[in-house]
Every structure is written in structure tokens, then in C-alpha cells.
Image (cartoon, rainbow, N blue to C red):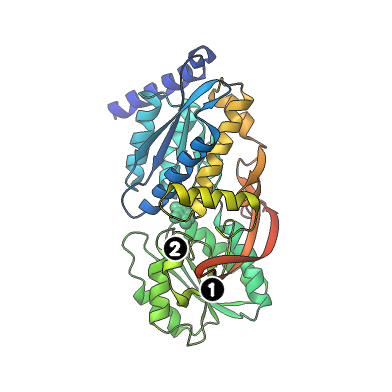
């Protein structure tokens, strides 16, 4: 208890110091990037770190004359660790911005530190709707599950899918995705046979897929976090669920670009909705993918990478707008309403909610030049998080 009070006071003091513009002059601008570099979400950490380093390599390590420093820390996918690292970064390293956050519990655990120390918390990966409500210093460059699930539910009923079983990871984003999809699908006249939730840690998908199969739905809607999709896809194919007439649909987390190319022909034809595909046909994206693959031994960027890349862009923009001075409140004000072209398409930060506004694309897995990609075929423009506009 004593320790917590001490840390709380230290966090407050660090915040007061950091917001003094005098301190800024001559000091490097530090971005504390907290990522899961090991553990179940390691692919998220690897993608975001690579994207952040690429952004710095392309845009230089100085903004408005101020040197920018990335301080990368591994939270091993454990939210208690995220919080402890965030405290250390604020109190000892005097970081100007906290960024990263591979999973929802990590982003939430850090929110009180962001608030107390007035440090912007740029969420580059985690996607539960309510995260931005946890602190007025949180800004998000990833996505929310309802953004993708609602357009997918509309597509499903228009394309002959009359019944579904839903299968989601049993925590924030999964519950958001399930709720948004089910509500919209039912409102459109669809039937939900069963809603299944699978544990986040060490999931065994087979009993859940068996249950889904027994329900004989037209489609199975799936959300699992990045890095887990291949395991679900493999079992879906092995069980012959597609042959039994069940279509696989989901948010784009299931056909993650990090794993898609290794999923094999069983993934062909899978329809998903999401904000980013490595196949997005813009000049900026082609440059981004080529540079990312070149600097990372051929690794293809996924939707986590783009969240990291755009998060860095947002931080650079904000630092520029403050003429290199920084300061939590000034940076926050500069981030609100910022808008630019991302490799995913046009994006902006809603000044009221601090959440991302972006296009959502319907995509189909196809073979392009011998490789599997999510090929976009329909665009929903400037989508806000539907869970917040109610
Ligand atoms: C979250 C994590 C993921 O890997 C993902 O694909 C979507 C959401 C999360 O924890 O918020």
C-alpha cells in the first residue's frame, strides 16, 4: 500500500515536471513503446516495433529540431508488467509519450498512470471500444471490433447467410465483436444459433468448433486476437467444416497478414471486414509494404504494424505542432482532429472521443502472384466506432 502511494506521488511529480516547457529544451523527446515482445502476443510486438523503427528511419530522428528517442520495453503480454513498466518509464525515464499496448488489459492497466502524469497514451494495437474512456490522455490508432463487425453483418445477410454460430475470445474485444455482430445480424433478420466464447490463454478450439459444427449454421463468425488465426483456420479445414457447407467469416484478425500466406488453400474465399490489408491498392501502401518487407527479412506488415506506423505519425505531427516543446496537454490538443493518409487509407482522430475514424473494407482471400492476400472489394468510408455513436 505504502509503495503504491509513493509511486502515485512520483508519477504525479514526474507529470508536473514533464509539463514544464523549460525542461523540454535540449532534452530528447522520449517515446516509451511498451509491447509484448515475448509470450502469446509476440507477433504483435514484433510487427509494431518494426513499423515504429521504419517510421523513424523514413522520417528522421528529429522533429522541429528536437531529437526523438524510442525506448522499447517488453511487457511479456502481462498487464501487471505493462503497468509497472509504464510507471518506470514515466518516473525514471521521463518519457513524453507512452505508446504500444498489444492487448486490451495492457492498455487499461496503464490508463491511471497516463491520467495522473498527464502523459499521452497512444494505443497502437488494443481494440476494445471502451479503452478511450479509461483516460482523457488515451488516443487510439488501431481500430475497434464493432467498426468491422457491423459492416460484416450487413454483408452476411445480403449474401445468403441466414444463420450463424459466433466464436470469440472471451475478453473485451471478443465480447465487443460478438455483441456488435449479433445485434446487427439479428436486426437484419438473421438467426444466431449459438454464441461461444473461448478462453484467451491457451485456448483449445476443438470442443468449440465441434459445437459450432453440430449447430449446422450457414456461417461461423470468428474473432481471435492477432497471432491465433492460423490455429483456428487449420482446425476449421481439418474438420471439413467448409465441405459441410459452413462458411468462415470474421473480423480481419482471423486472416492476419502475419500468418495468412502460410494458411494454405483452405483460407481461399474467406470473407472478412477490417481496416487494413497488405494488398490495399494505394501508392502509399505499396511503398510502405515494400519498405517494411525490405527492412524485415521479407516479413509482411499486418494491421498491427499499420497501427504502430500511424501512431508514430500522430506523435510526430503533434510534436511538430507544438514546435518541439511537447507537454502532455499540448500534445493531446494537437492529436485531437489530426488527419492524414495512412497505408490503410485516410484516417483521423475524432476530437471528441480520441478514437480513430477510418475506412472499413470487405475483403476476400485470394491468390495474387502466387501469394495469399485479403483482396478488398467494398469500402465503407470514414467509419466511427458504432459502439460510441449510440
Ligand atoms: C486485441 C488484440 C488483438 O491481437 C487483436 O487482433 C484485436 C484486439 C485486444 O486485446 O484489444
State the residue position of label 2: 224
Q: Quadrant of residue 2?
A: top left
Q: Is mark 2 within 8 Å of ligand 1?
A: yes
Q: Residue at the spot x=53%, y=37% of the render? A: 58
Is 3 on the left-hand or right-hand side of 278?
left
Give the x, y percent position of residue 240. Answer: 42, 84
Q: Residues within 10 Å of mark 1 (few under 14, many from 20)?
A: some
Q: Quadrant of residue 9?
A: top left
Q: Residue furthest top?
A: 22
State the residue position of label 1: 270
> Which of 209 and 233 lies nearest the eye of the viewer?
233
Is 75 on the left-hand or right-hand side of 17?
left
* Residue 350 in view here: no
- Classify the position of the N terminus by image quarter: top left
Q: Which mark is residue 385?
A: none
Is 90 on the left-hand or right-hand side of 58?
left
Q: Residues within 10 Å of mark 2 (few under 14, many from 20)?
A: many
Q: Residue furthest bottom?
A: 244
Give the x, y percent position of residue 252. Answer: 53, 62
Q: CA distance from mark 2 to mark 1?
A: 15 Å
Q: Residue at the spot x=49%, y=85% of the render? A: 216
CB under 8 Å between discs 2 and 1 = no
Q: Residue at the spot x=45%, y=66% of the render? A: 261
Give the x, y percent position of residue 325. Answer: 56, 19
* SS under mark 2: loop
Q: Residue at the spot x=35%, y=37% of the render? A: 73
Is 339 on the left-hand or right-hand side of 108?
right
Amino acid at each position: 500500500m505504502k509503495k503504491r502511494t509513493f509511486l502515485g506521488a512520483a508519477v504525479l511529480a514526474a507529470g508536473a515536471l514533464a509539463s514544464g516547457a523549460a525542461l523540454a529544451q535540449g532534452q530528447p523527446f522520449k517515446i516509451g513503446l511498451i509491447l509484448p515482445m515475448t509470450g502469446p502476443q509476440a507477433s504483435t510486438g514484433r510487427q509494431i516495433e518494426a513499423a515504429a523503427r521504419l517510421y523513424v528511419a523514413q522520417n528522421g530522428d528529429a522533429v522541429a529540431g528536437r531529437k526523438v528517442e524510442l525506448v522499447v520495453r517488453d511487457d511479456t503480454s502481462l498487464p501487471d508488467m505493462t503497468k509497472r513498466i509504464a510507471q518506470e518509464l514515466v518516473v525514471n525515464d521521463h518519457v513524453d509519450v507512452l505508446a504500444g499496448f498489444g492487448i486490451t488489459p495492457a492498455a487499461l492497466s496503464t490508463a491511471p498512470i497516463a491520467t495522473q502524469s498527464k502523459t499521452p497514451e497512444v494505443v497502437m494495437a488494443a481494440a476494445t471500444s471502451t479503452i478511450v474512456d479509461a483516460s482523457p490522455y488515451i488516443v487510439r490508432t488501431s481500430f475497434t471490433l464493432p467498426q468491422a463487425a457491423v459492416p460484416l453483418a450487413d454483408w452476411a445477410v445480403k449474401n445468403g447467410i441466414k444463420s450463424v454460430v459466433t466464436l470469440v475470445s472471451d475478453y473485451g474485444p471478443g465480447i465487443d465483436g460478438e455483441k456488435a455482430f449479433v445485434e446487427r445480424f439479428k436486426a437484419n433478420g438473421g438467426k444466431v444459433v449459438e454464441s461461444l466464447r473461448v478462453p484467451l490463454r491457451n485456448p483449445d478450439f476443438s470442443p468449440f468448433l465441434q459445437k459450432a459444427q453440430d449447430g449446422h449454421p450457414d456461417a461461423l463468425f470468428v474473432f481471435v486476437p492477432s497471432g491465433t488465426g492460423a490455429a483456428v483456420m487449420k482446425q476449421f479445414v481439418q474438420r471439413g467444416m467448409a465441405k459441410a457447407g459452413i462458411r468462415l467469416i470474421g473480423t480481419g484478425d482471423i486472416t492476419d497478414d502475419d500468418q495468412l500466406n502460410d494458411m494454405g488453400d483452405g483460407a481461399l474465399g474467406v470473407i472478412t471486414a477490417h481496416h487494413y490489408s497488405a494488398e490495399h491498392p494505394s501508392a502509399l501502401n505499396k511503398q510502405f509494404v515494400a519498405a517494411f518487407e525490405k527492412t524485415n527479412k521479407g516479413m509482411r506488415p499486418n494491421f498491427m504494424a499499420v497501427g504502430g506506423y500511424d501512431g508514430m505519425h500522430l506523435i510526430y505531427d503533434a510534436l511538430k505542432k507544438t514546435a518541439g516543446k511537447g507537454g502532455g496537454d499540448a500534445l493531446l490538443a494537437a492529436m485531437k482532429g489530426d488527419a492524414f493518409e495512412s497505408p490503410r487509407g485516410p484516417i483521423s482522430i475524432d476530437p471528441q472521443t480520441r478514437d480513430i475514424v477510418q475506412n472499413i473494407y470487405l475483403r476476400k482471400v485470394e491468390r495474387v502472384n502466387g501469394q495469399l492476400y485479403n483482396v478488398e472489394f467494398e469500402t465503407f468510408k470514414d467509419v466511427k466506432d458504432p459502439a460510441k455513436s449510440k
